[in-house]
Amino acid sequence: MVGGLFADPVVDWAKGWLRDLLADSRITYLKWDMNRPVTDGGRPGDLHGREWAIQHAEGYLDVMGMLRQEFPHVTVEACSGGGGRITADVLAVSDVVWPSDETGPRDRLAIQHGFLSAYSPHVMSSWVTDQPDRLDTEPASLEFRFLVAMAGVLGIGADLGAWTPAELATAADLVARYREVRETIHAGRIELHGTPADAVYAVEYGGPDRTVVLVYARAARPDHVSLQLRTLVPGTWYRVHDRTVVAEQLAAGVRVDFALSHDADLVVLDRLDRLE
């Protein structure tokens, strides 16, 4: 059964229930999940019964607005089947959104390519999971999975008890590295290099302090890979690969060593105030 938020008593009930729930100050994260579509909505006998979908959305936004106003400390994630409610009005009353339940890494990367063409990374919730790919079934390493999730708001939804000590150590290292570059990923200017179907695909984030590049590869990638970055500031010095270089020296491209994994790498260029 789906509760219809087109009726004032239902909206009032939802607000009251959420107020009671969130009175427990330990709750700081709420996910509004709407994975059951309504295909036969309506109210027989109601002159405006056919407007139920509009009224339901208005009721939903009313409840979400209450959450923002009364519980600003609670992080709210919006979600729906297929991401159907990732719209400007929803983004205005939520912190992050869930683009899709597809979390297989290569399939997810294709979804995120489209998402990041329209929306900001800081609202894109993305998780590392154990789910396999359904369409693009080329194998992907754990590092590849992490870099897919690191492209937005990183989360982990896997069975950690089944991971090996080595995998847990890799995860801990990548979480730490994500925290170091998260501000740039969330607030930087984003540039997409190619598409996820290419042998090498990259997402570049440029901020005032650094440029971060997440690189994804296939088995058919060339041995030598370099990327011509678009967010470097001319005349500015950067540290990359333990070298100090001026932006113009990187015009031909920044080398990608795939030091992280054979199919994924993280390249960070830290901006320097002066030559060191």
Image (cartoon, grey):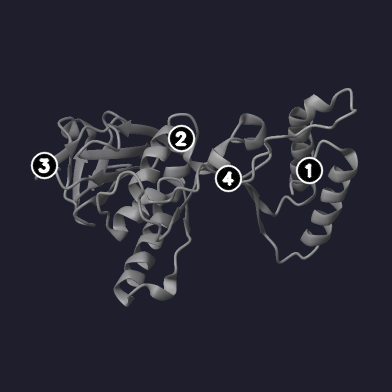
Q: Distance between the residues labelled 1 and 3?
A: 52 Å
Q: Do the residues labelled 4 and 3 touch (CB within 8 Å)?
A: no
Instruction: State the residue position of label 3.
Output: 222
Q: Distance between the residues labelled 1 and 2?
A: 26 Å
Q: How far apart are marks 4 and 3 (CA)?
A: 36 Å
Q: Position of residue 44 (x, y in %)?
A: 86, 30
Q: How far apart are marks 4 and 2 (CA)?
A: 13 Å
Q: Which amino acid is tagged 2?
A: Phe
Q: Which residue is drawn at 47% across and 40% down?
A: 121
User: Which type of secondary structure does the marked residue at label 1 adopt?
Assistant: helix
Q: Which residue is drawn at 19% across and 50% down?
A: 241
Instruction: State the residue position of label 2.
Output: 115
Q: Which amino acid is tagged 3?
A: Pro
Instruction: State the residue position of label 1.
Output: 63
Mark earlier in primary sequence (1, 2): 1
Q: Are marks 4 and 2 in contact (CB under 8 Å)?
A: no
Mark earlier in primary sequence (3, 2): 2
Q: Where is residue 242 in the image (x, y as percent from the top left)?
A: 19, 52
Compared to residue 273, the image places residue 49 above or below, namely above
Q: Position of residue 220 (x, y in %)?
A: 14, 43
Residue 231 in sight in this render:
no
Mark earlier in primary sequence (1, 4): 1
Q: Which of 25 and 113 is in front in this view?
A: 113
Looking at the image, which residue sits at the far left? 223
